[in-house]
Amino acid sequence: MSRAAQRLGGSAARAVGAGSGVIAGAEPRYGNDATPVPATGPSDGGALDRLADELLGGIRERGTYRRMRVLEGVQAPRMTVDGRDVLLFAGSNYLDLARHPEVVAAAERGTRQWGCAAGGSRLITGNLACHEALEAELAAFFGREAALAFNTGYMANVGVIPALVGPGDVLVSDALNHASIIDGARLARCDVEVFAHGDVDAFGQTLAAARARARRVLVAVDGVYSMDGDVAPVAEIVRRAREVDAIVLLDDAHGTGCLGARGRGTAEQAGVLGEVDVLMGTLGKSLGSFGAFVVGSSRLRELLVNTARSFIFSCALAPAQVEAARAALRLVDAEPWRRARLAANCDRLRARLADAGLSTAPSTTHILPLVLGDNARTMAVCEALLERGFYAQGIRHPSVPQGTARLRITPMATHEPHEIDALADALVGLVGDPAPSGD
Ligand code: PMP
């Protein structure tokens, strides 16, 4: 048992050991602790252990076993990952705002002013003036009537979708939409019609068929696809949805803060910022805090306050997160160089890899996939990259379709050009021939 696990003692220690088992051959450690994590904790032979062994055995066989890496240090382009000092190309803190002095100071101030917790759900005791201020600022930022904060993007989608559609209604959904949209539809118990990823014609046909049979039609797309880095054809989707009186939900978790001339995201870039019915964005990625929001009409806000169960039945965001997000929003306007440098870094990496014959298609944004296909090879390249001082996470099914395992590479605004070049050199060295073995 690792020292970190021992410190937890008793059953908590067993839980840590069991939950962090590894594929034979690898030797993950807790932080800088030299003790390898055991593959599986001791079994008491009970029903739960047998169930876990059976399910985890299947996951191991499919090569999709996951474990959590341990990171140390402040969120930054360079961090310690599993005890190794590396350049981070795996996060969603794209603009490097999570450690910005103004964001940190705002979080500290928020905690001092309001305490560490909101102390309840928004509809009971948790609606602090800072939540209302954040929402007013979000609405102004996007030039919309109103905003409502949610605790995460996941919770926004699983709250908003059932608030808008139910049994007999149809959700028209892109094939690569985020899991939280899929889960939102499950909770809504609506019908789901999936169209081929990013295909406007397929979208049009699916939309027409949905319109013909359902009273209410909700269209949901990601703005930037989180594992491919391509952008939804938002303008065309909004235009066609309007023609048939369908509602549009745009999940811009990854576009917020990064895309568009003023960082308002995918909808701004597409010229339809004022026309998306339900614009969802997150506070925990480029905005360097935690949480999420929906912006749109004040009637939408009113409806969600009264019906979105993930909003109603959950404790409100902590004041530190709220104040950090407010500071980050101001910085998106005050420091546009971050957006520009993020784009420049990504273009540089894209070009360096393309020169060496490595494609990051279909990405046009700050999320660059390097599709390797095979699960074991992808994870072997990920480990080899770590050994060379770079962290870009390997992504496998079910996060991406079978057979399309990839490295998901996410540069930050504050990586130096020479760091981008060093990553490109390491990738070219590893992904060219001979390929590292997956053993
Ligand atoms: N939507 C998309 C497209 C995402 O990529 C994510 C997170 N990876 C979410 C929603 C969920 O956001 P959060 O992490 O705030 O729950």
Image (spheres, rainbow, N blue to C red):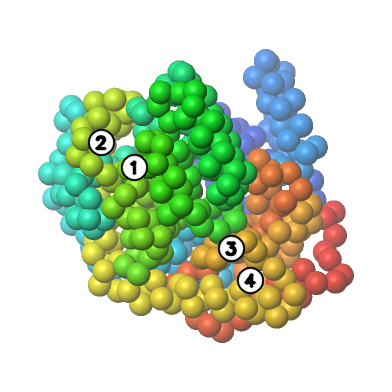
Question: Which residue is depicted at the point 29% across and 25% down?
Answer: 307
Whole-percent x, y for residue 200 in the image = 55, 49
Whole-percent x, y for residue 18 in the image = 64, 35
Q: Secondary structure at mark 2?
A: helix
Say if mark 1 contacts mark 2, CB within 8 Å. yes
> Counting residues from the N terminus, which is met first, the one under dot 1 or under dot 4?
1
How far is disc 4 from disc 3 in space, using C-alphas?
24 Å
Question: Which residue is depicted at the point 65% across and 51% down?
Answer: 395
Give the quadrant of residue 431: bottom right
> Counting residues from the N terminus, which is met first, the one under dot 4 or under dot 3?
3
Give the quadrant of residue 316: top left
How far is disc 3 from disc 2 in space, using C-alphas?
32 Å
Q: Is mark 1 within 8 Å of ligand 1?
A: no
> Counting residues from the N terminus, which is met first, the one under dot 1 or under dot 2?
1
Whole-percent x, y for residue 350 in the image = 61, 73
Nearer to us in this view, 134 or 316: 134
Please tell me the numbered disc located at residue 389.
Answer: 4
Q: Amino acid at mark 4?
A: Gly
Residue placed under numbered mark 2 in the picture: 300
How far is disc 4 from disc 2 in space, using C-alphas?
47 Å
Q: Characterize the local packing of mark 1: few (<14), some (14-19) or many (20 or more) Cα atoms within 10 angstroms.
A: many
Question: Which residue is depicted at the point 84% across and 66% down?
Answer: 435
Q: Characterize the local packing of mark 4: few (<14), some (14-19) or many (20 or more) Cα atoms within 10 angstroms.
A: some
Residue placed under numbered mark 1 in the picture: 278
Q: Characterize the local packing of mark 3: few (<14), some (14-19) or many (20 or more) Cα atoms within 10 angstroms.
A: many
Say if mark 3 contacts mark 2, CB within 8 Å. no
Residue placed under numbered mark 3 in the picture: 363
How far is disc 3 from disc 1 in space, using C-alphas?
24 Å
Residue 439 visible in the shown view: yes
